[in-house]
Amino acid sequence: MRADLHVHSCYSNDGVSTPDQIVEVAAQVGLGCVAITDHNSFEAYFDIKDNGKVIIIPGEEVSSKEGHILAFGINKEIPRGMSIQETIDAIHEAGGYAFAAHPYRWWSGIGEKNTLSYNFDGTEARNARSIKGANKKSEKLAAKIGKPSSAGSDAHSPMRIGHGYVDLPDGLTTWQDVVAALMRGEAKASSKSRRMNGSLRYGIKSIGQWIGRGFKKM
């Protein structure tokens, strides 16, 4: 099974995909599972959790004070703006697992030191919106830590769904099965990488948005 473990819907303030579009595109590109990881929102999961085509993992990309943290398998929305440890604790209290998202993305990642210093359940080793060098460093960091690795497209539009993914054993039928396999270390991370010119344009746009938010993480 192929699973994209980092997808945004229109419930993210920078996403355009409707939840139904995510399901349709995911099925078209051969994904068996998608983790809905909207920025500080847990709403999209309930729109498509029983779609009958693609397994949907309940998740969120949480904006901690220091950067973004992925939550997989949660049962409620995790508040933004807490410290890294408070965010990890809140994810665990919600029944989920906390992964350091794109740790080397300087305007929204938590960085190498924080990824190593806190007891994350895993690391996002590949992200299709990260440049090649950042993905290489993330893979090495994940291998050094020795915990489960995830990967995803970080898609904010339908056309990018499936550009990042993990390969998992076949025969998984529920999101709980998928998360359990991920946590057993059975996921093989893969993704495209953003080209430098695209990353430069995105970086300029993101910095402008960051300034507009009063220097707060998205």
Image: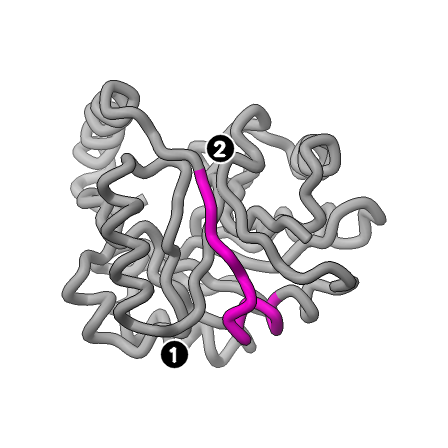
Judge left or right: residue 102 versus residue 167: left
Which quadrant of the figure contains the C terminus? Answer: top left
Q: Nearer the viewer, residue 135 or 12?
A: 135
The residue located at (26%, 47%) in the rendering is 108
Indicate the quadrant where residue 84 lies: bottom left
Left or right: where 117 falls relative to 195: left
Residue at 74 percent of width and 63 percent of height: 172
User: Residue beneath label 1, please?
Assistant: 89
How dense is the environment of label 2, judged by Cα within 10 Å: few (below 14), some, or many (20 and up)?
many
N-terminal label among 2 and 1: 1
How far across and how far down the image is residue 198, in percent? Answer: 29, 21
Total number of numbered discs in the rendering: 2
Disc 2 secondary structure class: loop
Q: Nearer the viewer, mark 2 or mark 1?
A: 2
Q: Amino acid at mark 2?
A: His
Name the residue that disc number 2 marks: 156
Q: Position of residue 122 (x, y in %)?
A: 40, 68
Magenta-span inclusion, residue 88? no
Q: Residue furthest right?
A: 52
* x 30%, y 45%: residue: 135
Image x and y of residue 30, in percent: 70, 38
Q: Which residues are magenta?
A: 179-191
The secondary structure type at the circle numbered 1 is: helix
Amino acid identity at mark 1: Asp
Q: Nearer the viewer, residue 150 or 201?
A: 150
Residue 138 in sight:
yes
